Each structure stands twice: as C-alpha cells, then as structure tokens.
Image: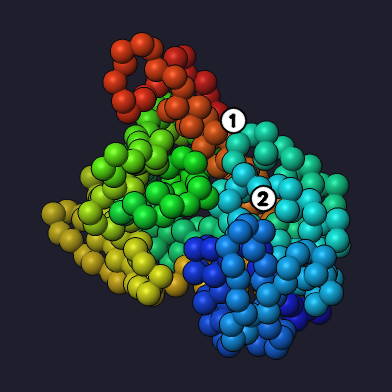
Amino acid sequence: MARTVLRTLLIGLGRAGAGLHLPVLTRARAAHPELFADRPVVGLDPGSRPSTATDGLVIADSLHHARRHLDPAGTVVHLCTPPQVRGALLEEAASLGYRRFIVEKPLAADRTALSHVLDAVDRHGLHVHVVSPWLHSALTERLAALIGEVGDIRSITVTQDKPRFRRSLTSGSHTNAFEVEVPHALGVLLRLLGDAEVRTASCTDLRWGDEIVRHMGGATLTLRHRDGVRSRIRCDLTSPVRRRRITIETTTGARLVGHYPVAQDDDVAQLDLWRGGRRVRERLHDDALHRCLTHAYRRFAGGAPGAAAEATEGLRLHARTVELLDDAKRLAIEDPPEGAPSPVSRRRGAARHAG
C-alpha cells in the first residue's frame, strides 16, 4: 500500500495540545518528512482560551473553518480536549469527513461516553489511536522482554507522584485524579498481566488553604488479574516530588524497578534489575510520546504491517481501560456512610473473574 503524506488538525490548545503534542509534532515533522506534509498544523480551541498563531500553526475558528484549510482524506485529527466533551467533537469531525483520529487518554470519561465513542467509530468507519506513551515506551518494551527471563510476575506496583496544584485549582479539564496519570499505568498493567477487575479504589481531595478541589488530590487502585496476580497503582497529585516508578516482583525473587521520564524535557528512562543480591542498572533513550505519535502516523499512512489487527486490539485495550477507570471512580467517590472519614474507600464483595 502506498503511503499517504498527512496534515494535522489539532483540536484543543491547552496543556496536552499546545504544550505536548505541538512541540513533539514539530520534531517528528522534521525527522519524518515521508509521513508529514510540509504544511502548517491547523489548530482550534473549542474553549474560551484565546489562541494565537505561531510558527507552523494556523488558527481556525471552528471545525467548519478548519475544513476550508484541510482535506479530511489526508488529515489526522488530534483530539486534545477534556474527556467530557471529546465524544461530541469526534462526532462533529466525523460528520465533516475526517476519519483518522489521535485521541488523548483516557478514550472516554465513563462507560456511557465510551459507548457513544465506539458507536461513532463503527458508524463512520473511524481509525482511532489513543495517546499511550507508556505503551510505546522503551522501558515498557524492555520490561516485557525481561519478564520470561527473570521469572513469572508475582506483583506489580506503580507509583505516579507529581505536584499538580495550579492546574487542578484553575482548570476543570479533569474531574477526578483517576483521569490524570492512572490511565498510563493501567494500560501497561493490562499489557503485562492481561485483563483485570478492580478490587479496591480510593481518592482524596486537593486542598490549598481554604480551597478544596474534590477528588483531585490523588488516587489509589488495586487490581486482580487473571491467574490471581495483584497489581497496585498509587498516584499523589500533591507530592513535593515527581516520580513515575514501576516495581515488578517475580516468583524467582528477582526484582525490576523502572523509572519512566518525569518531564517533557527528559527522555531517559532507567531500570534496575535486582537478582541474586546484585543490581544491574540500564539507561534507555525513551522519547515515548514521539514514538507514540510517529507510530500512529505511520499506521495511518499505510506503512505499518498488521495495522488493522493492531488498531482493533489497541482500541479494545483502551476501551477496557475506560471501563476499569469507571469502576474505580464509582467505588472511590460513592457517598460514604454518615460519619465515615475521607478519603472515601470501597472494597468489592465477591470476586468476579475477568474474562
């Protein structure tokens, strides 16, 4: 199949769109001219944020205005808006003829929104790639390769800490801490351990002086995977330090401790393998978002072998991630019994095997 050189429509010019996607696209366009058309990115912001054109970026007032600049048949749409409004924008863009989409994580806000998104995908024949840097990370690939060598997995713990006071206090782009960092880790756990069910979930409020942002202080989640393996995600959005760490305990006593890069200006991951009382450290170049976006464009352009099967499997994994996040949020934010302390925490009753 001949490759298609593609243009870009960037919807949402906040932190994800203008702060992350745009600079990565700038690098990717320079490195892969065979994938990206030598034309400016077209951007629009459905919110109230004022937008101004910059080098390589043309601002459109609406999707209909953007349509005058772009041929949908040769365009990739990046949906970098909050998950609560993403489904409606996906539908509107699809009605204008766009078929290739890169969607920020999570794919949808909850099961109901997910159903609408998947319905739009089926009705319009859309090709959707969910932003998942950790799934395209060199560190994740290395961990997956080492698992069989060092023994079966006994448990995995992921720690995701960062201070997020300003954005949580000033932006409503996320309504729950489970939507911020947890989707990255959850996708990796599903890849390494297979399907799961939520066993426990809790979240805390973010507090700054007299201000309180409900459910945005942090989140904790435990999962039970097939074969009974347990995993745990802990995310603290009030932490004084940044940390993205994954710890894998194996049945042989070996231990893997990986550190994902914590900032967009840092593209080095580190991995410690503890075995037989000795530690071996590896450092890996890990520009994961660049890998994620260029992989998507290569797939959209027709240059990725097995693209159709991979797309179906990828969408299924991200849909399952949304379902588990929805389960976790429901468990964590149910109204507590009178007198119960915060944070709210719930535990499932009888175990239910995930298929």
- Asked which secondary structure carries label 1, the reply is loop
State the residue in front, 275 or 286: 286
> Who's the residue at 59% across and 41% down the image?
109
Q: How crowded is mark 2: few (under 14 residues within 10 Å), some or many (20 or more)?
A: many
| Tag 1 near tag 2, CB within 8 Å | no
In the rendered structure, which disc, 1 or 2, sits on the residue that comes first in sequence? 2
Residue 132 shows in this picture: yes
Could you say where residue 92 lies in the image, as x and y percent from the top left?
A: 80, 54
The answer to whether 275 appears left or right of 139 in the picture is left
State the residue in front, 320 or 146: 320
The span from disc 1 to disc 2 (Cα, nearest Å) is 29 Å
Q: How crowded is mark 1: few (under 14 residues within 10 Å), some or many (20 or more)?
A: few
Could you say where residue 331 lies in the image, as x and y percent from the top left?
A: 46, 25
Q: Is residue 59 above or below residue 114?
A: below
Amino acid residing under circle 2: Arg
Residue 189 shows in this picture: no
Quarter holding the C terminus is top right
Quarter holding the N terminus is bottom right
